[in-house]
Image: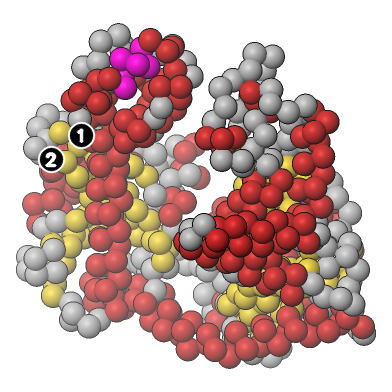
Amino acid sequence: MDIIREKLKLLPDNPGVYIMLDKYSNVIYVGKARILKNRVRQYFHSSPKPDKVMRMVENIADFNYIITKSESDALALENNLIKKYKPKYNILLKDDKTYPYIKADLKNDFPAFYVTRRVKKDGSKYYGPYMGGVNYKDVLEILQLTFQVRLCHTAITEKPKRECLNYHIGRCHAPCAHKCTKEQYAQNVKNALNFLEGDYNQGEELLKSKMLAAAENENFELALDYRNKIEMLTKMEARRITSLSNFLDADVIAYTTNNLYSAVNVLITRKGIMQGGTSYALEDAHSDDGEALTQFITQYYSNHFPPSEIITSDCCEKELLEEFFKNKFDKSVKITFAKQGVKAELYNMAKENACEYLEKTIDKIRHKDDMTVNACKRLQEILGLKRYPRRMECYDISNVSGVDKVGSMVVFIDGEADRSNYRRFKIKTVEGANDFASLQEVLKRRLSKLGTDEEDRFARPDLIIIDGGKGQLFAVKSIFDEMEICDIELISLAKREEEVFTLDREESVMIDKRDFSLKMLQRIRDEAHRFAITYFRNLHSKRNLESVLAEIDGIGKKKRIALLERFKSIDKIMNASVEDLAETEGIGEKLAKNIKQYFEENI
């Protein structure tokens, strides 16, 4: 605490970001401040603090700070640092989803419609997000059935192409085959856009006529599919809030807390229609609800395109957020504090959902702590580890008879999988099936990143876990000795008896089968095995595919690569038409027929 007292005296009056560290120099919290001196000192005053803040303060051993030009810059930097370090006491949206949108590519003379999860400023129109039981695939199919717009990426050129199946079954006017004029297709696009904006009448009428025709022809399965799509349109229409403007695009965000855990509910409204909502359970160390809500909003919109309006609580930092959206998206987003009327009713609905979610999920969060953070503490206690194993890495090797040897590295932070940091290794120097030598190669390549410019991407682990027994453990220890690594703990987990081997014990450690710390070790070991097997299968199938293609006359290396890039798998090449094969770079119609004939005769 002497270091902290001295640093507190030196804090500036500038805006900026402060970074709290534990005794192992792990980043445990990142925050922004209008005045660094005032904000950081608050944590160390003797004044009463909520339990969630006290838990964080008890673990602070040091802090750093970065001065910024403005509070808005501090907000953006805070968001970036949270993504980078994933601090234990910050709000982390680990289960955040990016919802699908339907994109209409209006820059094209014959626009296509397709799904995307990223909204860009590219001249296209975007509709969505699709959530809450509305399947974007069904919406696309309705567009195709009703308005005959194309859903493909086929380039339209002066030379007409051959019509595909969709033209022959009445699902596309085939502009690529010059079967319709630009004006005719433009009318179809206009009708499709009206449908996506909420005018479902034309689509519903056409689906009803198709359903009746299918039923008359005793094609009951098709008739049932049409009926399901009509029901989906009815569901979408029922979500229209009659008292809202048809032009209202708004997200409604409500935050609630019990001073230990927090929850947020996000309701999404587009064109006056309620699309659905999502709730998030949070564990944060903010003493101020407005600060917590502001941080949630900046993180949430790192993965989602913002609407024109956000309806939320008046505790959030309105001007700061509006400036954030202007800088990040070059878009004006209005932050509204609704006190009455239908917008206030929407906010109250979101608040009620957040409160219920917090109440229903609190026990699950506590159980999750037992399975993660508390399991890490328990493992440290049982094995006598020198430090809390916050970042754990587990390694596994996979091969069959020494062929296509691969290694995997999976990463768990505070007992939870951090998939963004997983890595795969193709074994380069080992001959035959030698798991010990393969592990040594993988660990040498991974540990060589420490102390280099790449350490930001490959952070130093607290604990390395090897899938295997004593032999695998000491094979890796020889690499530790060779590279003079002495500040990273090393253990192995043998599968048969679930024995844990350490470097400072002759005998293995047997952890009770019911203990959460063993269950956590099993999770990380099984995840490393799954990740290695998946990579091995991908390599193995690709190698087998290349060997099959090599048997066909006229298919050299470049053409094999072109086919692999276009079709990805042997099944897709086998089932492709001659026309599709011929469109592959370097293939042509004659060679496409040879490929088709080869598979028909040999497989």
Position of residue 405 in the picture relative to residue 225 (left or right): left
Quadrant in which the N terminus is drawn:
bottom right
Q: Residues within 10 Å of mark 1 (few under 14, many from 20)?
A: many
The mark tally for this picture is 2
Q: Residue at x 39, y 49 (%)?
A: 422
Q: Residue at x 25, y 15 (%)?
A: 552
Query: Where residue 15 sits in the image (x, y, percent)?
Result: 81, 59
Please name the amino acid that badge 2 sits on: Val
Relative height, residue 434 to residue 69 (above, below): above
Position of residue 304 in the picture relative to residue 465 (left or right): right
Say whether marks 2 and 1 touch (CB < 8 Å).
yes
Q: Which image quadrant is residue 318 in? A: bottom right
> In what element is the residue under mark 1?
strand
Q: Nearer the viewer, residue 311 or 233?
A: 233
Query: Where residue 233 sits in the image (x, y, percent)?
Result: 68, 66
Please name the amino acid that badge 1 sits on: Asp
Decide if residue 202 is in sight here.
Answer: yes
Which mark is drawn over residue 400? 2
Query: Where residue 511 sits in the image (x, y, percent)?
Result: 18, 77
> Magenta part of the protein: which range?
591-596
Relative height, residue 229 to residue 359 (above, below): above
Please give the residue where the numbered disc 1 appears in the rendered image: 404
Decide if residue 16 is in sight here.
Answer: no
> In what element is the residue under mark 2?
strand
Q: Which image quadrant is residue 168 in? A: top right
Q: Residue at x 36, y 65 (%)?
A: 389
